[in-house]
Image (cartoon, rainbow, N blue to C red):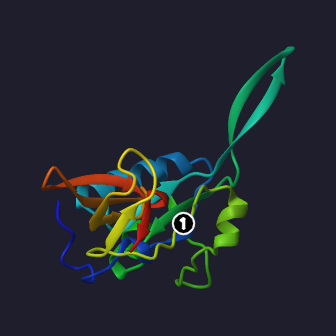
Amino acid sequence: MAKPDTAMPELEKQDAQWYVVHTYSGYENKVKANLEKIIENRGLQDLILDVRVPMREEIEVKDGVKRSVMRKVYPGYVVVRMVMTDETWYIVRNTRGVTGFVGPGSKPIPLSDEEIEKMGIDIVSVHIDFGVGDSVKVISGPLESFIGKIEDIDYDKQKARVAVSMFGRNTPVELDFVQLEKI
């Protein structure tokens, strides 16, 4: 499905930030499921990128038996990685089980990298020195020392599609950012 017309043009995934959403106690997983369904139905994958209920693994001993249990780190809260627009704010805010965003009044405040790290969300901010159309050299892997041109960049997967010349033909290959170096 295409990006909705109401979204601002040229919004990029790198503009997305993490926001904390307050939910009714015990509704965290329902809110996550509802949001994911809305995102899929309305084609908002480019604007609302990730919805998580922060969990941690704990070892519980019951009747002399150890077992691993996943517990909510912040009961009553869900974190959402999204590009904040009027439409995305409205959709998240009006999802069943959501009581509101965390922040003063109706203005949500995104989490800082330090806060994200403390929450235990596996987020890595990636800064690369190349962009679409740039020439790069492959520095590791089976295509080491090949030269190519960046066709597409996927920040979420930390991969780039590179057109590499093999046997006299340009062949697109997907490579990790760490395998590439700008020429």
Whether residue 151 is visible here, answered yes or no, is no
Give the x, y percent position of residue 50.
Answer: 45, 58
Write the residue at 32% across / 79% down. Answer: 11
- Corner quadrant of residue 76: bottom right
Write the residue at 32% across / 57% down. Answer: 146
Q: Nearer the viewer, residue 131 or 102?
A: 131
Identify the residue at the far right of this view: 64
Q: Quadrant of the N terminus?
A: bottom left
Q: Nearer the viewer, residue 127 or 21?
A: 127
Give the x, y percent position of residue 95.
Answer: 41, 61
Write the residue at 60% across / 47% down. Answer: 26
Mark 1 secondary-structure assignment: strand
- Corner quadrant of residue 24: bottom right
* In this picture, residue 103 sits left or right of residue 52: right
Residue that badge 1 annotates: 99
Q: Nearer the viewer, residue 85 or 175?
A: 175
Rendered view: 68 above or below 148: above
For badge 1, the amino acid type reads Thr
Give the x, y percent position of residue 6.
Answer: 22, 79
Crowding near the residue tagged with mark 1, few <14, some 14–19, many ≥20 C-alpha atoms within 10 Å: some
* In this picture, residue 164 sits left or right of residue 105: left
* In this picture, residue 98 sits left or right of residue 131: right
- Corner quadrant of residue 21: bottom right
Q: Quadrant of the C terminus?
A: bottom left
Whether residue 172 is visible here, answered yes or no, is yes
Write the residue at 76% across / 36% down. Answer: 58
